[in-house]
Structure formats: structure tokens, C-alpha cells
Image: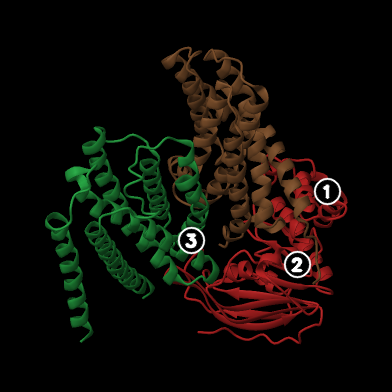
Amino acid sequence: MPSNGSNSGAAVWAILRKECRSEWRTRYGLSAALLFAITTLTSVSFAVGRLTDRTDMLAALLWVVLLFAALASLSHAFVREVEGHTLTLLRLVASPTAIGLGKLLFNLVFLVVIEAVTVPLYLMLMGAPPPRWGAFLALLGLGSLGLACAATLIGAVISQTRGRGALFAGVSLPLLLPVLAAAVSGMRAQWAGGPIAAEARLLGAYAAALLAASLLLYDHLWED
Amino acid sequence: MDREVRMIGRLALFLWIAGWMVAAFVWAPLVPVLGETTRVLYFHIPAAWVTVLALAWSMGHSVLYLRRRRIEHDHHAAAAAEIGILFCVAATISGSLWAKAMWGSYWNWDPRETSIFFLLLVYAAYLALRSAIEQEERRARLSAIYSALAFVTVPFLMFVVPRIYFTLHPDPIINPRGKLDMDPRIRIVFFAMLAGFTGLYFWLQTLRVRVARLEHRLDES
Amino acid sequence: MSAVLASAAPDTAVALEARDLTHRYGRRTGLEPVSFALGAPGVVAITGANGSGKSTLLRIVAGLLRATGGTAVLTVEGHAIAPAERRCWVGYAAPELSFYDELSVEENLVFAAEARGLDAPAAAAAAALARVGLDSRAGDRVPALSSGMKQRLRLAFALLHRPPVLLLDEPGSHMDDEGRATLAGLVEQERRARLVLIATNDEREWRLAEQRIELRGRGLGHPA
């Protein structure tokens, strides 16, 4: 079987770099997302105040803020391609799976940037007790991975429909609930001093399952 | 001839369900812990069962559509989702009323309640997605992709998450997945209603698919 | 109803064969059943009224669109190329092909070359730009280009990975005389080794071709 310039690894990497460069040049995606995350955070803090002794609430609200930030911003990756009419270009230079992975990695980087700003701010504003950093970051990382996997694929689906923001949130939510449940439970546990092994395993398994399914499904996304 | 067979079938289904519903009130005894609310289990659990059955039917046909690309599979997937959500709402409401009668509150986010609500969300999301796409082929394909992804999620939320939370659900007495510690008469009525509901589901499913097929043929001409 | 058959002796290197190829958009027929057998080298013009399916046909051959009926088989050195792989073997240039506005001309092509896994992406991009006469505009952002220049960029994109098949949809649109001369020169160079399909209603572009396939459709305006 002759091959002529078909290298998925190179494609994924090229797409990731292109996304980062595009985002850096236009920056409206990132600034809008950061603004939204900070607005949500401020609203929560204003409404609820400091919650130093309520670590269960702290865990829950942190993930609600992150979930909202993800839902508001992660569909951007594909919507931008559709609105710029560049999807044809992309489909001609890379396989659907490579496109999906490239966008997924970008969304992950995007989420990490948002969390790097939002999470410390959250801990400070809400008067959270110091977390067990290892467990805390592990949960944050695995949870973000799950969020990104689901949101990227759903973003690709939604970008081909008439619906946009609200539809994206509604359609993604059922897929994000396991992440929410496990992550909140784990966060609570780490503040209470207990083990997070079960939740971490769940988050990891779920992200892996979503990723595996995505790799099979991206091929069917664009056929017209 | 075929028409008459169908008429008789429908009548038989109606009489079956109606008859066993009456039996549930006059013939089957009460479960001690549940008291008068025992009756709900003949409706609520079959409804929940059909919800899951319809979901499996829908997801199965979605995957088949992606592999074979025959529009028939999309008709089945969409029909199953529409019927499934009806039964899901019925199961949720009956469950909620039961919870109120038994434990005093309509909703507690206990694992079973969470699971059925989650299924409601999946159904609603699937139908919402479909309504946002006009082209038939694209609609079939994208909703099948979503369905396949949801298929991965369902086991996680239905079986794994409940282990994390405490449960109020009356598991020891009525556990559809485990062994049944029921009085024989209760068991008979229960299984009869289960069969009746399953029959009801397939009848509705067949009807809805026929409508979809006709609509499709109309669009083609 | 079915189109004129263009006869060509299939070359051993590249062969494109269509049998009753047809496509429907909902209840409308975008491409009436067409059959042909073509081989490299050569230039074939695809003509027909607006809406007869010229663009649709090219998209199907390029693997961008899944036809609703019939078959189109592209064979390279005896191996049939699945639609998902066509992008590696086909150079596609059409009006709907857009580039990334936030990247420069050169950056767009380098991205395409990297994603395709070409060995020397920068060199390939530079070479393609030189062939279409855009090397002086390499550093410009895409929105700064005139529509004629953008058309040249599309041609450069199609030639980038030196594919054995070129699919050109209205390649001369928006071009001035100099641009058309460049186009004619390119087609002249490529015809000796490649299979070139040109979809057009413009007589000046027909004349570049040796054979012609005329699509007889009812005329629907722009499909999709």
C-alpha cells in the first residue's frame, strides 16, 4: 500500500501548534474564557462568602465553576473552524482522528491555563484550607482530562448543527456528570484527609473510556 | 387478515395489562414494609425497565447505523428514544411519588433517583441534538455518534457512581438485579406486568418506526 | 439522464473510475448518475450548468463527501485508495477552500506541509509559492490578499504535496490575465505526469483540456 504523506503524529503536533499560534494571535477565545471564569467565581464568592469550614461545599463549588468555564469555552475550537470555513483545509491535510486529538490537546492546554488562574483565586477568595497538593492536583488533572475529552468531541458534533452555546452545554452535561460526581467526592475526601484512590481510578477509567470511544468516532464526524 | 391479527393483538395487550393491574389490587398481598405503596412497584419498576430497554435499543441501532449506514437503523434509534423518554418520565414521577409516600420527600438524589434522572438527561440531550439538525443523513450520523458516546457513559453513572453515595432505596426487598425475596403472588403479578410493559414498548416502537418510514418515503418523492 | 462517457486508456499509475455515481441532497439530486474511466496523464474538463454537480463530483473524488449512490474508485499503482485516504493523493482547490486569516500565506502552507508529514515543510511551501508566483507575498496575512491572489494560494495548496491527481474547481475565477497565464502554464506542466480534472463553465479553461465530461443536471444553484 503506497503512502504519500500520511503521518498522524506529525499532524496532531502541527495542529496543536497551529491552534496555539492562532489563539495567541487573536486571543479573544482565551480572554473571553478567563473573563467568564472569573465572573462566575466572583459571583459565587459574592453570594456565598468564605467557606473555610465547609470543605464539602468548597469542593462542589470549585467544580461547578470549572464546569461552567469549560462549557463556555471548549466548543470554541471547532466553532472557529466552521465559522472561518477552514474545515475543508483541515480535512484535506489531516485524518479526522488526528484533527480530534490535536484539538483535544489544545483544549487541555486551554483548560490548564484557565485553571492556573481560576483555582488559586478560588482558594484565596473562598478561604479554603490548604489542600493536599498531590491529591488535589491529581484530581484536577484527571477531571480536566475527562472534561476535555467529552467537550472536544461534542464540540465537533455541535459545530455542525444549528444550535450553539446552549445546545453544547445541554448535550455535554450528561457526559460530564460522572466527572463532576467523582471529582467532587475526591476533593471532599482530600480535604477531609481521606484517600482518593477510588475517585482517581474512576476519573482515569472514564477519561480512558471516552478517549477510546472518541478515537473510533471521529472518523464518522465529517462526511459532507 | 393481517389487520385483524393486529387488532386482536392490541386488544390482548390491553386486557393483559388491565387484568394484571386489577390483580395487583385485589389478589397480590402487600409487602409489609411498604404497606399500601406496594402497588407502585408494579408500575414504577416495569417503567424503569422499559426506559433501559429502549435506551439499549436506541444505542444498538445507532451503532448499527454507523456501521451499515441504512436509514432504517436511524428510524429505530429515534423512535426508541422518543418512547424511552416517555417511560423515563413515568418512572421518574412514579418513583418520586413513591419516595414522598415512603420517606416524606419527593427527591433526595439517592443513587437510583440520580440514575433515572441521568437517563432522562441523556434522552433529552439526544432529542435536542436531533432537533437542531435538518438534513436527514447528518442528523442520523451525528446523533448516532452522540448515542455511541453516551453508551460509554451510562455504565459509569448507573453502576459505579452509586458506590460512592449512600442509598435509601429499598434494595433488600425488591432488587431487580439480584434474587427476589418476594411472596409468590407478588412475583407473578410483577413479572406479568413486566411482560405487559415490554409488549407495550415494542408495539409503540413498531408504530413509530412505521410512521418514520412513511415520512421518509414522503420526503423522497 | 446519464452523462457522456469520456473514453481514456487507463494508465498503470493512476486510474479514476466512476460507475453510476450520483448524489442527493435531501430530496434534491445534486449529481445525476455519471460514469467514466480516466487515467493519468491527462487533463479532463468537467462541464455543465450551474447546479449540475461539478463541485459535488470533485468533492466526492477528493473524499470530502460520501456519495449517496454509485461508486468512484481511485487506483494508484494498482491499489484502490479509500475515501479517507484520498487527501494524500489528491490536490484539491475550490472556491470554498479558505485559509486561516490569522496566519500568513507562508504559515498556512507550512502548516499544511507539516500536517501532511512532508519531509521539508518550509522548502515545499516555498517551492509551491514560487510556482504560482506568490513568493513575494509570503509574509502577508491572508486577508490582505486580493481574490486573484487567494486563488493562486489555493493552487499552491493543491500542488504542495505533489499529488498524482489534481482537482481544480473553477481555477481561473477572480484571476487577471497574468494569473490565467500562470494557471495555463501550471496545467501544461502537470498534464505530462498527472491526472488533472478541471470543473468549469469558462471556455478559456475548457481549452486547457484534452477531454470533456459534460454533466447533465437540472440545475439547482449551489449545492450545500
Residue at image mark 2: C89
- Picture mark count: 3
| Amino acid at circle 2 | Trp
Horizontally, residue B138 falls left or right of residue B185, namely: right
Query: Where does the image place residue B73, in percent across and percent down from the top left?
Result: 44, 69
Q: Is mark 1 on a helix, strand or loop?
A: helix
Say which amino acid is labelled 3: Arg
The 10 Å Cα crowd at callout 3, few under 14, some 14 to 19, many 20 or more, is some
- The one of A150 and C192 positioned closer to us in this rendering: A150
> Badge 1 local density, few (<14 within 10 Å), some, or many (20+)?
some
**Is residue A69 shown to the viewer in this render?**
no
Up the image or down, C124 lies above or below C61; here it is above
Instruction: Where is residue B169? Give x, y as percent.
Output: 34, 41
Q: Hue of chain B?
A: green
Q: Does B135 appear above or below B127?
A: below
Q: Which residue is identified by label 3?
A: B138
User: Residue A184, image x and y in percent?
Assistant: 51, 30
Q: Could you tell me residue C189's position as x and y percent?
A: 84, 69
Task: Please say if C77 is above or below B30.
Answer: below
Question: Which SS class for mark 3?
Answer: helix
